[in-house]
Amino acid sequence: MRFSELTDDVNQEIFRVGFEKSKPILGGKVVLMATPGMIPYHPTKKITSSDQFRITAKDKDGTQIGWVNFEMIGNELEAIDVVVDPSYRRQGIASEMYRFAKELSGSSLPPSGKLTKHGRAFRGGLDLTEGLAHPIICVDVQPEYAYYGNNEPVCRDIVRFVNKQTGPVLMFVNAEDQGMSGDTVTDIQMFWEDTIRGEDFNYEADEVPEDDVNWNRFTIVDKGFGYFRAWMDLEANESLIIRVIRAMYQAKINDSREFEDVGIELPELVGEEWQEWMKDDPLIINWTSVAQLRKFSGAYIVGGGKNECLREVELLMNAFNIKYKRIESLVY
């Protein structure tokens, strides 16, 4: 379920005058402090609560190095802004502030539409990460698709989300090596690096580019595309596609047209769902390694297209019961 669909009740104590909770993080090097936000003034009435909630982060000398402000929108607590001093970034401080807010408020903290571009990109993953080292599968986040239609904002959010993690990344692309797009692997890497450095990106005044991409974390696979697409586009049932994929692996063939070569009649395998086009429009399964996918069991999956290339990866993982979690906000 997407976090934006959750409507948990919020602990109202966090807004009341006098509320104060602290939490040391990073081995005590930083302390988080939760308080109500600014208390509004009224000339005749005593105000006992705020309409905002705030978490600040201070270093061991008491210097404020970051904060997150929240307010109530309907019956949900939403983030208005998030700021971390540049010299303290990439230590998980913002993540810890959000987690502390969730502990105290009982809220699922859906992303706020008021966040800056930087905040939205970062915030898109905070609720979904159990740790920065979580494995990620990324599909087709590259110039040819990023600059098509309305994909650009999502692709940029994906790049920034992935770059904030520290775990392994299995990156599927359609590159020139397979003749499937005009992008080369080098083009794709440059697009990622330009996005991270802030080139061709409208940063807010308080934003700075992040660290360069650590390509040592990435396994890049030029997969091409369309290996399940004929059956998908002609609306074959996904359960049927999975059944045929499993049969192909068991028969040790890579192309569904090869069933005859191993003494299997595809019409009999398919049964009542058989269509004549299935004879000539194949399923092909040798575009990636199942063993490699198994290493990414439980990974977050991001990218696109959600009913095309990304869905092909998901179907292959489904065929072998390899778990994954699609982050809907980071899918185009």
Image (tube, rainbow, N blue to C red):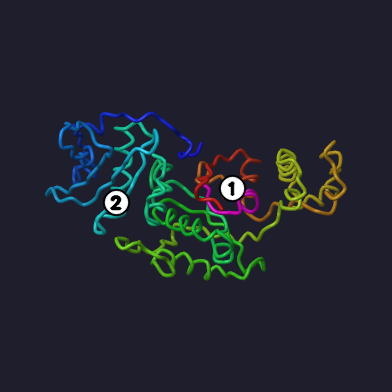
The kind of residue on which mark 2 rests is: Gln
What residue is drawn where x is 41% and y is 61%?
Answer: 214
Front residue of 44/121: it is: 44
Q: Which mark is residue 132?
A: none
Measured Cα–Cα span from mark 1 to mark 2: 33 Å
The quadrant in which residue 194 appears is bottom left
Q: Can residue 165 be seen in this view?
A: no
- Whether residue 304 appears in magenta in the rendering, the answer is yes
Q: Is residue 169 visible?
A: yes
**Considering only vertical position in the picture, is 186 above or below 79?**
below
Q: Residue 91 carries which label?
A: 2
The kind of residue on which mark 1 rests is: Ala
Image position of 187 (left or right of 21): right
On the image, the x and y values in percent for residue 73 come to 38, 39
**Secondary structure under the numbered disc 2 in the rendered image:** loop
**Secondary structure under the numbered disc 1 in the rendered image:** helix
Magenta-drawn segment = 301-311
Residue bearing the label numbered 1? 291
Question: N-terminal of the two: label 1 or label 2?
Answer: 2
What residue is drawn where x is 43% and y is 32%?
Answer: 7
On the image, the x and y values in percent for residue 285 come to 70, 51
On the image, the x and y values in percent for residue 170 come to 52, 54
On the image, the x and y values in percent for residue 145 come to 58, 62
